[in-house]
Image: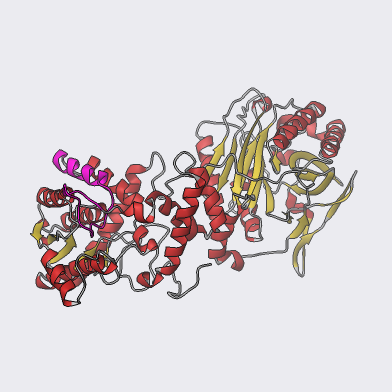
């Protein structure tokens, strides 16, 4: 498969083991880490606040010698980047006129591209930066047009360089902004406006000391800010080499993306360290495109600084540090209980509201002994319990036909008995035989007419029973089936309330397993686990001679774990076929060949576009996931559209 970088940007957060006030030594350590990052294919490397001097120099910042040494070290590092395909962000003090600023320098290919001064200076407790530094706000002034730079550029050894808090750095592939340490902790972090102005990556050069509880709080701030402004957030802070007098530093590093912590480094390391990760720019742009606040809330004027690093010999072709979950719909580790109970709560709350509003006496469900009808039954029983209704008001109807296996039939019967609901069994083989005869269809021709006739008869039976018992039909079809159009139009595609319509097949299986292990007694658990272990089948073709399932859905349309992966990244982020294929080959490298994945991805794409007409008239159902196919909410698509 031909690969590109698919919008991934490889970044690094580095913590050099510095010597306080030894600028020459610190520069050498920085250069060593730059080389390490280049070997790893890093595009942007970020060092901590005041890296070249050390953060804890205190009144030594007043000395001309330290200031001169810092500038000499800065020029040394800058020159070292010449001819190297990397952007370096590094902290150092900078004297401008009579003011000393705590700054972040952006450099590449031997040039300083811009200098960003720290805005919010902490001055309480162990911090007293206002003793030495001037806030970046001092470099702007109020004009009739608003705040504009008072000192737009500074004169460095390499010429005039943009200077100020209004700098936005852009490359041909992405844009980034900078904030320094305390800026993130302020009520209005600069990164908010930087992101609104277009910065997709935010780098934070920090020197935040370590006290008990601060690590977790810092994590929360970073992940929340990355989620709030849909950005990649790269944070690095001073290491233990800064520890002195009353403060200890731990060398905290984090890389987050849109509310998810992608990587964090080990703290309290006694050597220089670095974490590397890839940020998915395309993913961020998808969410920003849907968030109209990004175009509404722009304030002020920002200068766009074009940063053109030297071209790489080999473009990044794969996000080696990025892990793609093979099951994006399943709960994160450690959050299983809350996640599953949230799903059940959303389903049952939606069903309870519809039940009460319609004043229905019953809810009617077709019970097949398969996964989907089992999940709908579980949620319906839970809803009845919470409403204080007797479970007899849940009516389960099993409708054995030509393809019903002994295993699924027995499981359906036993499950209904154990749950204490009203149970009805209505065989449909005779009805289907008569119907096929009526329309002059040979019953020995097992084509789509043969299959769909059974599905529509089952729906007819359920609808009429609902009328008979003053109830409504609860649909059992899931999100994966809707995406693929794997449902009979006006058959199992239709109901009066589509309870599972927002639950993908992989999650259906997970939820039934969770319910078996956590919500029911041992007898019920055994039945539920056997249902989970039963192959997925519509059971519309005759069983084999032993009465076992002869029709297997995943042999026909492909593995649901693949289709759910395709569905998530296609619907949630709008990724191209090529990018989804690449990500899937990484996620399933131990399970499927690239050729197999490509084949089923083609099937998914073709069926998704072809089957929209079934989704355009789907019934109401509770929205559960961030991905949904409801034509009234998340997905509006012409029924007659060519595949793109």
Give the magenta-colored segment's residue range: 522-550
Closer to the camera, 511 or 99? 511
In percent of the image, x 80 and y 46: which residue is there?
310
Determine which quarter of the picture holds residue 173.
bottom right
Describe residue 168's horizontal placement relative to residue 637 as left or right: right
In percent of the image, x 35 and y 52: which residue is there?
555
Closer to the camera, 388 or 306? 306
Describe residue 146's horizontal placement relative to residue 359 as left or right: right
Coordinates of residue 296 in the picture (x, y in percent):
60, 68
Please say if 422 is above or below 459: above
Please say if 160 is above or below 100: below
Determine which quarter of the picture holds residue 538.
bottom left
Magenta-drawn stretch contains 100: no
Describe residue 17's horizontal placement relative to residue 571 as left or right: right
Viewer can see residue 291: no
Closer to the camera, 222 or 354? 354
Coordinates of residue 557 in the picture (x, y in percent):
37, 56
Describe residue 4's horizontal placement relative to residue 415 as left or right: right
Coordinates of residue 607 in the picture (x, y in percent):
42, 64
Coordinates of residue 14 in the picture (x, y in percent):
67, 35
Closer to the camera, 486 or 253? 486
């Amino acid at each position: 498969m031909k690969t590109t970088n698919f919008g991934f940007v490889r970044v690094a957060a580095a913590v050099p083991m510095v010597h306080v006030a030894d600028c020459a030594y610190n520069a050498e350590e920085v250069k060593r880490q730059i080389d390490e990052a280049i070997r790893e294919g890093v595009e942007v490397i970020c060092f901590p606040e005041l890296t070249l001097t050390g953060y804890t120099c205190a009144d030594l910042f007043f000395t001309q010698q330290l200031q001169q040494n810092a500038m000499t070290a800065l020029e040394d590092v800058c020159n070292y980047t010449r001819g190297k395909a990397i952007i370096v962000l590094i902290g150092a003090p900078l004297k401008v006129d009579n003011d000393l600023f705590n700054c972040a320098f952006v450099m590449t290919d031997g040039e300083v591209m811009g200098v960003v001064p720290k805005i919010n200076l902490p001055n309480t407790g162990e911090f007293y930066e206002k003793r030495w530094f001037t806030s970046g706000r001092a470099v702007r002034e109020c004009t009739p047009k608003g705040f504009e730079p008072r000192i737009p550029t500074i004169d460095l050894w390499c010429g005039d360089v943009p200077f100020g808090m209004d700098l936005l750095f852009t490359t041909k592939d992405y844009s980034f902004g900078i904030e320094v340490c305390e800026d993130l902790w302020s009520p209005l972090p600069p990164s908010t406006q930087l992101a609104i102005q277009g910065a997709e990556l935010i780098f934070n050069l920090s020197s935040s000391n370590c006290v008990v509880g601060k690590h977790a709080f810092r994590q929360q701030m970073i992940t929340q800010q990355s989620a709030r402004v849909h950005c990649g957030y790269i944070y690095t802070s001073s290491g233990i080499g800064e520890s002195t007098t009353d403060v200890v530093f731990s060398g905290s590093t984090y890389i987050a993306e849109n509310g998810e912590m992608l990587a964090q480094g080990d703290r309290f390391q006694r050597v220089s360290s670095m974490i590397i990760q890839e940020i998915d720019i395309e993913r961020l742009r998808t969410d920003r495109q849907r968030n109209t606040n990004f175009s509404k809330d722009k304030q002020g004027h920002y200068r766009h600084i074009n940063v053109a690093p030297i071209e790489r010999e080999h473009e990044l072709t794969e996000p080696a540090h990025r892990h793609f979950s093979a099951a994006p719909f399943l709960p994160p580790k450690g959050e299983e209980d809350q996640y599953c109970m949230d799903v059940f709560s959303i389903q049952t709350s939606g069903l309870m509201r519809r039940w009460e509003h319609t004043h229905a006496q019953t809810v009617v469900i077709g019970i097949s002994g398969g996964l989907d009808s089992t999940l709908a039954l579980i949620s319906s029983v839970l809803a009845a319990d919470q409403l204080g209704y007797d479970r007899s008001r849940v009516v389960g109807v099993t409708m054995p036909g030509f393809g019903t296996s002994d295993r699924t039939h027995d499981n359906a019967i036993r499950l209904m008995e154990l749950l204490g609901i009203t149970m009805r069994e209505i065989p449909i083989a005779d009805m289907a035989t008569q119907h096929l005869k009526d329309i002059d269809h040979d019953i020995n021709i097992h084509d789509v007419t043969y299959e769909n006739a059974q599905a529509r008869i089952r729906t007819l039976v359920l609808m009429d029973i609902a009328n008979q018992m003053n109830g409504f039909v609860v649909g059992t079809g899931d999100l994966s089936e809707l995406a693929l159009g794997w449902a009979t139009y006006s058959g199992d595609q239709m109901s009066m309330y589509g309870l599972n319509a927002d639950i993908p097949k992989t999650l259906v299986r997970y939820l039934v397993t969770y319910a078996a292990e956590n919500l029911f007694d041992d007898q019920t658990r055994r039945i539920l686990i056997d249902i989970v272990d039963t192959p997925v089948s519509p059971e519309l073709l005759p069983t084999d001679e032993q009465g076992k399932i002869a029709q297997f859905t995943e042999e026909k349309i492909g593995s649901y774990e693949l289709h759910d992966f395709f569905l998530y990244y296609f619907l949630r982020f709008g990724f191209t076929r090529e990018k989804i294929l690449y990500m899937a080959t990484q996620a399933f490298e131990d399970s499927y060949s690239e050729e197999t994945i490509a084949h089923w991805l083609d099937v998914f794409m073709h069926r998704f576009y072809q089957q929209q007409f079934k989704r355009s008239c789907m019934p109401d159902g509770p929205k559960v996931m961030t991905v949904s196919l409801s034509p009234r909410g998340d997905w509006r698509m012409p029924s007659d559209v060519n595949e793109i």
